[in-house]
Image (cartoon, grey):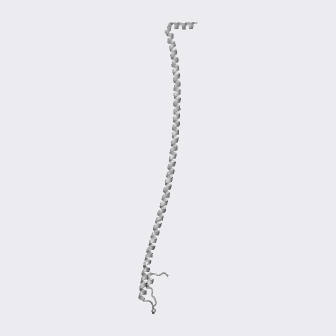
Amino acid sequence: MRLTPLDVRKQEFGRQMRGYDQDEVRGFLDAVADEYEAATRENKELQGLLSEMKQKLQEFQQMESNLKDAAVNATKAARDAEDRSSREADMLLQGARLESEQIIADSRRKHQQILDDIARLEGQRRSFILSMKTILRNQVDLLELLENDPLDSIREQNNSTDE
């Protein structure tokens, strides 16, 4: 059976001769009831405080869990962003390599084409010079013939055709 401060206050004792002084017993029971009441009140306050602390602890544990989740999510997001950036950088680098290889190949083709054009033009130049030399020699030969005696050369030509 649980005693309450009221039970202590209302407790009655039988009377006997040579018993305890009733006023002292009553005073003591009142003091015990007061202390018991104070202890009960303090216990209730402590129970309430404990309940509040448990509630706050749960809130803090929830906040801690949320923070851990947020940290894990942030770490994962950072890792994902880093992976994505790395893949994008690799793709850009590969694209740049391919483009530079294409530019180099095009430059080599153009360079070879220019060399071929130079060789072709050089051949045409030599051929032109040769042709011009031949024409000029023929002209010089003709001039020399004409210079000597134009009539003699005509006669010689006629004579050679007559024969």
The C terminus appears in which quarter of the rendering?
top right
**Position in image of residue 64 (x %, y %):** 48, 62
Quadrant of residue 53 in the image?
bottom left
Q: For the view shown, which residue lies furthest in the bottom direction?
A: 17
Q: How many numbered marks, from 0 up? A: 0
User: Which residue corresponds to the image point at 50% horizontal and 51% vertical from the top-left?
Assistant: 82
From what the image shows, is residue 18 above or below residue 129?
below
User: Which residue corresponds to the image point at 51% horizontal and 12% vertical from the top-left?
Assistant: 142
From what the image shows, is residue 124 above or below residue 102?
above
From what the image shows, is residue 95 above or below residue 57?
above
**Position in image of residue 38 (x %, y %):** 42, 78
39 or 136, which is in the foreground? 39
User: Which residue corresponds to the image point at 46% horizontal and 71% vertical from the top-left?
Assistant: 50
85 or 18, which is in the foreground? 18
**Position in image of residue 72 (x %, y %):** 50, 58
Q: For the view shown, which residue lies furthest in the right direction?
A: 163
Quadrant of residue 4 in the image?
bottom left
User: Which residue corresponds to the image point at 52% horizontal and 38% vertical from the top-left?
Assistant: 102
